[in-house]
Image (spheres, grey):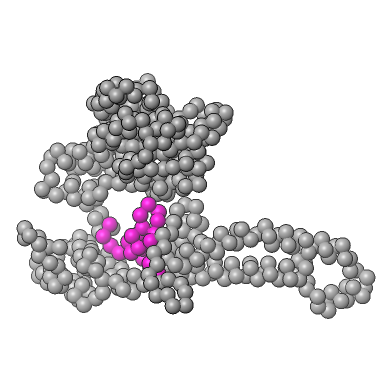
Amino acid sequence: MAPFNISKRQTDVLKQVLNLNVNPDQQSIKDATEEFKILVLDQFNKDIVAPLLRVNDLREFGVTLHLQLESDRQPVPGVSAVYIIQPTEATIQRLSKDISEGLYESYYINFTTSAPSKFLEVLATDLVRSNSVHRVAKIHDQYINFISLEPSLFHLAQPKVYTRLNSHLTQEAEIQSTVNAVVDGLFSVFATLGEAPEIRFPRRGVAEKIAQDLYTRIRDNLRAPNSLFLSSSAASVIGGVGGNDGPLTLCLLDRNFDLAAALQHSWTYKPLVHDLLGMKLNRVTVHATGSGEHSTAAVTRPLDVDDHDWFWQHCGAKPFPEVAEEADKQLQSYRAAVEEINRQTAGGGNGSGSGSGGATGALEGSFDPDAQMKRSAQGLRAAVSSLPALQEKKKIIDKHMSIATALLTAIKARGIDQLQSTEEEVLAAPGSVNFDAAAKLILTGKGTVADKLRLAAVCLLVADGFSEAEAEKLKGALAPHLVKVEGGGVA
């Protein structure tokens, strides 16, 4: 199987939804995209669409307005509405209200996952009561209940899931609800890919529970007449049940398997941007000083970084100093290209200028005005054709220069370089963790309270055993930074 591209597959599903789920013949698609329509999203699906489709992409499919389900909306008669929503009690109630009030001409309803029958029965009852069943054109389950950020990166948008699954205060019903949400998201991922994976997991713990529930759901779908998994069999889904011929393998591990990896400070570009600048949905917000002779006001600039950004893809895994060098290198390359264009347009496009070599050629009778004009026209044409690409390159370079500047400011303010190097030393020698050095950095070094807690946690998680006195050193260093809260805890 070729390497999968989860963001492309999810984008294809969204485009099909905007095509009103018509049959994939060109004439039908053309008619669907030319029809003006309104897109209505709940908050979760707004986050799904944001990294994948821009406003211009939506316009290509005839979307003139995109609105949020939870907001107050005015009626738009004579226009179809495409809804992409989660099947929850709240969204079903709002959908039923919209249809009953006749906000739009017709409704194309798409659920991010399989809608429970009890919710569909409530919707049907409400629509019959309001005599508005005829307004519903189509209802589909799309199985896109996850957020794609890159071709091989997605997340399930489950905030505080680690706390819910590991806290002794969490009730059993809440744990099961969280497991169901994770299973539903993973099922949607593989349904979108059209491939049932072989599942590997450690025995005991929440990973096994999720694996078993996911296996059951995939197995039942494989046995259905219209399976979402076209090239898989039930025997290949779970490790130990079938063979090892599955094209995809899903390894489910408890987060506690390597908790330090999630806490340590990174020194590579993408993790730094995410950690220090709060990247969300492939968008970074950079704070800078406003431009102008007397302007000192702070300016907030949202910047998009995704798989269409060549610099982001090329430098994402590089250490930050190398990223700064690469940005400078690309800037010099851009300037050299601009100088070359200026030289060609000023010198007639042949690069020879009008020095002594040109005069000698003219004296020898080799000068041809028509050839010179042709070369000049070719040079101008080449210069004009290369300008859009150069402008786009400059835009991307400027964007990453802004990000790098913001990163450098945050690194200096929080002492990330010291924290990262100390954590690297701990990871490199877990048998000889220097608790004194870590405690001193926590007590006197820069960084937020969260930064200091992360360093202490990495030391305790990675060390091959530690004494109570060593733990007390870290606790004593942290004490001045922590505030007691009600219930005996700290914050």
Query: In percent of the image, x 26 and y 71: which residue is there?
Result: 447
Residue 343 in the image: state x and y as whole percent: 71, 71
**Image: 210 above or below 388:** above
Which quadrant holds residue 132?
top left
Q: Is residue 179 left or right of residue 81?
A: left
Left or right: 331 with respect to 12? right
Does the rendering let one see residue 154?
yes
Point 81% across, 75% down: residue: 354
The magenta stretch spans residue 272: yes
Q: Nearer the viewer, residue 320 or 408?
A: 408
Q: Residue at x 65, y 71 (%)?
A: 339
Residue under the point 31% across and 37% down: 86
Tell which of 73 and 388 is nearer to you.
73
Residue 251 visible within the image = no
Q: How many marks?
A: 0
Q: Quadrant of the C terminus?
A: bottom left
- The picture places residue 68, in percent across and down from the top left corner, at 35, 43
| Residue 316, quarter of picture | bottom left
Side of 142 relative to 60 (left or right): left
In the rendering, at what x and y percent does residue 244 appear? 36, 35
Query: Range of the magenta residues?
Result: 262-288
Toward the viewer: 386 or 154?
386
Note whether 392 is above or below 253 in the view shown: below
Horizontal side of residue 445 vs 479, given as left or right = right
Residue 275, image x and y in percent?
32, 61
When the figure is inspected, residue 240 is found, relative to residue 460, above or below; the finding is: above
Residue 198 inside the magenta-drawn segment: no
